[in-house]
Image (cartoon, rainbow, N blue to C red):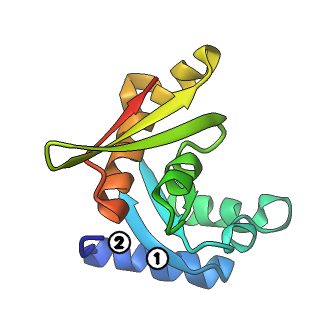
Amino acid sequence: MSEIKLSTEELRYIAMFEQTTGAEVRDCIVDEDRIIYVVEAGNMGAAIGKNGEHINKVKENVDKHVELVEYSEDPSEFIKNAFGPVAVSSVNLVNKDDKQYAYVQVSNNSKGLAIGSNGKNIDKVKMIANRHHNIDSVIIQ
């Protein structure tokens, strides 16, 4: 894993999130209209809270869309977690020409959701897979 550098803004968002939810955050990415939190494995329940009260409070505080991804040491499991509600059948990691590729199998009717509007979902997965597991590209099959 490469070293992740966080901005002052991202550190403030992490502090607020941890204080509000009690969940540990491993990474935070501030995108144009959303914030992506990578929470430690096993902390997803605390991050969401009973009936979503923790995550809803965070959304009110930041006034942006908030996305959560549960961290995993296993790159395949991490990629599955990053796709959120999309059911991923399999993740095949391949090393080719000194690069690591993740080939992700999803059902045909889930491909649109996996890619997202203007590629937003797949871009998120590619970004965090690279930040946490040095995966150069994620390809949906």
Residue identified by numbered label 2: 10
Tell me what residue is drawn at x 32 percent, y 50 percent: 127
Instruction: Identify residue type, mark 2.
Output: Glu
Task: Report if the CB atoms under discs 1 and 2 are less than 8 Å apart.
Answer: yes
Q: Is residue 82 visible?
A: yes
Local packing at callout 2 (Cα closer than 10 Å; few below 14, some 14-19, many 20+) is some
Instruction: Identify residue type, mark 1.
Output: Ile
Relative to residue 42, is residue 128 drawn left or right?
Answer: left
Q: Residue furthest left?
A: 97
What kind of element bears circle 2? helix
Local packing at callout 1 (Cα closer than 10 Å; few below 14, some 14-19, many 20+) is many
As displayed, is residue 54 above or below residue 100? Answer: below
Tell me what residue is drawn at x 66 percent, y 35 percent: 87
Relative to residue 15, is residue 97 drawn left or right?
Answer: left
Residue identified by numbered label 1: 14
Tell me what residue is drawn at x 32 percent, y 72 percent: 9
Relative to residue 51, is residue 63 drawn left or right?
Answer: left
The percent coordinates of residue 114 (x first, y second) are 52, 30
Q: Which mark is residue 137?
A: none
Camera-nearest residue between 101 and 24? 101
The percent coordinates of residue 53 (x first, y second) are 77, 64
Tell me what residue is drawn at x 41 percent, y 70 percent: 27
Q: Is residue 64 visible?
A: no
Q: Residue furthest top?
A: 108
Camera-nearest residue between 76 and 125? 76
Report the label total.
2
The percent coordinates of residue 79 (x first, y second) are 49, 49
